[in-house]
Image (cartoon, rainbow, N blue to C red):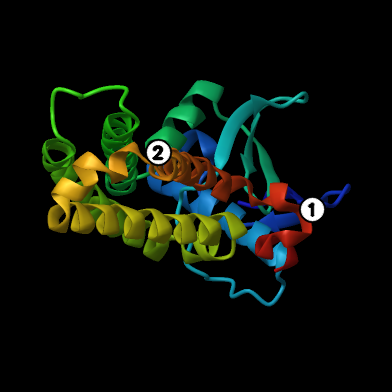
Amino acid sequence: MDISVDVWLRGDNHATTYVINPVGREPGNWTESDVSAVLVSMLRTLERARNPEAPADRPVALRGFSWIVNPFDEGGVVIALELSLGAIVAGPFNIGERDLSVLIQNHNSWVIPTIQSIHIVGIGVVLGSVFMVDLRILGWAGMDQTLRQTTNRFGPWLTGALCALLATGALMVVGEPVRELVTISFWVKMFLVVLGTIVALFFQSTLRKHEEHWEKDLVNRTGVKWLAVATFLIWVAIIILGRLIAYDHVWGSWSPAKKA
């Protein structure tokens, strides 16, 4: 069946209409695989609207977009998707709003949500571990323990979480390279991740080698305390930038996605 779709590219004030034909059966008989085919075709259409030379069968990962099913004024329902590239609306479809919403919710396998969940938990563990060590450096908590004892307690959690972030982050990039790699938010995030990791590893290494110097002198220096605050803010910025990957247009002309 032919499906009409309206595409709005980010920065444009007009829509362009296309026709797609991803499935043969009527909406009332759709399965989860049919809905997946419709969503993939919509995302490919949005990509070709931005880049007409993009392959028609370009691999697409069904994540990284916001969606909603809305009633259509003249009957039926429409599917609306929003990404950093723009927005696309398909329909109307002669199917119940709730039925179509359930099909969209179930279209994806458990793999990607699981990877994303592990990634988010990893970020939380990293942030929490850095926060507890920083509180000890600032003298606001954990004063009944030495700095070495505090890092021995939270350091393994920090290291393990960083490894989990590396693994799950790589899988997400492989799953949808265009969404990740063609954004300034991603590259700034990666720079801060490398910077934060270097600071954490350097701190743990120097503490092991010069524990007494740290306990008696360095931990009391104002510069070290400010560095602890800066390190925590780096990881907060990483979380914010990770969310902004889907909204890279906020960078305006700086965004590679906007220029692509």
Dot 1: few (<14), some (14–19), or many (≥20) neighbours within 10 Å?
few
Question: Which amino acid type is marked by label 1?
Answer: Thr
Badge 2 amino acid: Lys
Binning the other alpha carbons within 10 Å of mark 2 as few (below 14), some (14 to 19) or many (20 upward) gives some
* Residue in the picture at 60% in, 53% down: 42
The answer to whether residue 134 is left or right of residue 40 is left
Q: Which residue is mark 2?
A: 225
| Residue at 58% in and 65% down | 182
Percent x, y for residue 7?
75, 51
Q: Nearer the viewer, residue 187 or 25?
A: 187
Q: Which residue lies under the disc numbered 1?
A: 17
Q: Which percent across, then down, holds residue 91?
A: 67, 40
- Nearest to the eye among marks 1 and 2: give it: 2
Q: Which mark is residue 104?
A: none
- Label 2: state its secondary structure: helix
Residue at position x 71%, y 46% from top? 250
Residue 80 x %, y %: 64, 38
Could you tell whether 219 is left or right of 208 in the image? right
Residue 115 to residue 60: above or below: above
